[in-house]
Image (cartoon, rainbow, N blue to C red):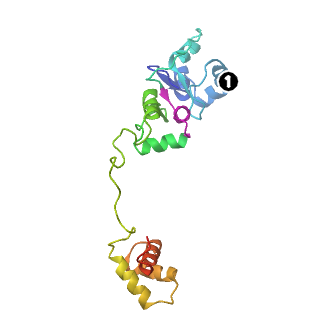
Amino acid sequence: MIPRNRPVINERDIAQQAGVPLAAWRRRDAPGFRQRVPALFDSRARVYDEAQTHAYLNGQPIPPLPAEPHPDDLLNDEEAAALLGVTPSTVRAYASQNYLPRGTTVYSLRLWARHDIETRRDTPPRQGQGGGRPLGKGGPNKAHAYEGDSRLDIAAEALTASPDLPRTHLAAALAKQHGSSPRTWERLLAQAAHPTAQ
């Protein structure tokens, strides 16, 4: 978590401020630094609180991070997932599907404000967002999914013309000739063979 309004810094920028190449800093300085200044996330992309980093580099006491959560804290996918009770990949999917804001990127880390995650937790997808069918409205009153589909006539003619041909072969031929997938044509053939089935 990045506490609200706390600037962060990564190891490349720390090494640059220390005036040494990153590889040398990691080899020589990083072990001691990491013991005193914890990374804000347990991930490959290590970021640190800038105030804590500067205190360490200047030989000063390390200031503590705020202890209390704040709505403007920034959370990574794992922290957001823990709040939502889902997996980190679900958090990323929610962001892609607009169930969550897209988040912000800090040093290649995708992060979300705590208040956005808590809002999603307290208002799950599709509730109160205008999604779904209005109450009292029924679905379509079709006898079957392909009712009124002109391809049913083509399927019926094909069944009559080639009664001994396996349906999978017939479906493949119809798909090649008329488009759609062979699986769709298998369904159409099944419906054409039993038009009253529901």
**Residue drawn 39% across the image and 83% down it:** 156
* On screen, residue 124 above or below 136: above
| Magenta span includes 181 | no
**44 left or right of 116 in image:** right
Foreground residue among 25 and 190: 190
**Residue drawn 34% across the image and 55% down it:** 138
Foreground residue among 80 and 145: 145
Q: Pointer 1: residues within 10 angstroms few (<14), some, or many (20+)? A: few
**136 left or right of 54 in image:** left
Query: Residue 108 location in percent, x, y?
Result: 49, 36
Report the amino acid beneath label 1. Pro
Q: In which quadrant is the C terminus drawn?
A: bottom left
| Magenta span includes 82 | yes
Foreground residue among 59 and 148: 148
* On screen, residue 50 above or below 189: above
**94 left or right of 56 in image:** left
Q: Quadrant of residue 53?
A: top right
The region drawn magenta spans 74-87
Residue position marked by numbered label 1 in the rendering: 31
Foreground residue among 35 and 189: 189
Q: Judging from the image, what secondary structure is the residue with disc 1 in?
A: helix
Query: Residue 193 location in percent, x, y?
Result: 44, 81
**194 left or right of 153 in image:** right
**Residue drawn 55% across the image and 20% down it:** 18
Query: Residue 127 location in percent, x, y?
Result: 40, 40
**Residue drawn 37% across the image and 78% down it:** 152
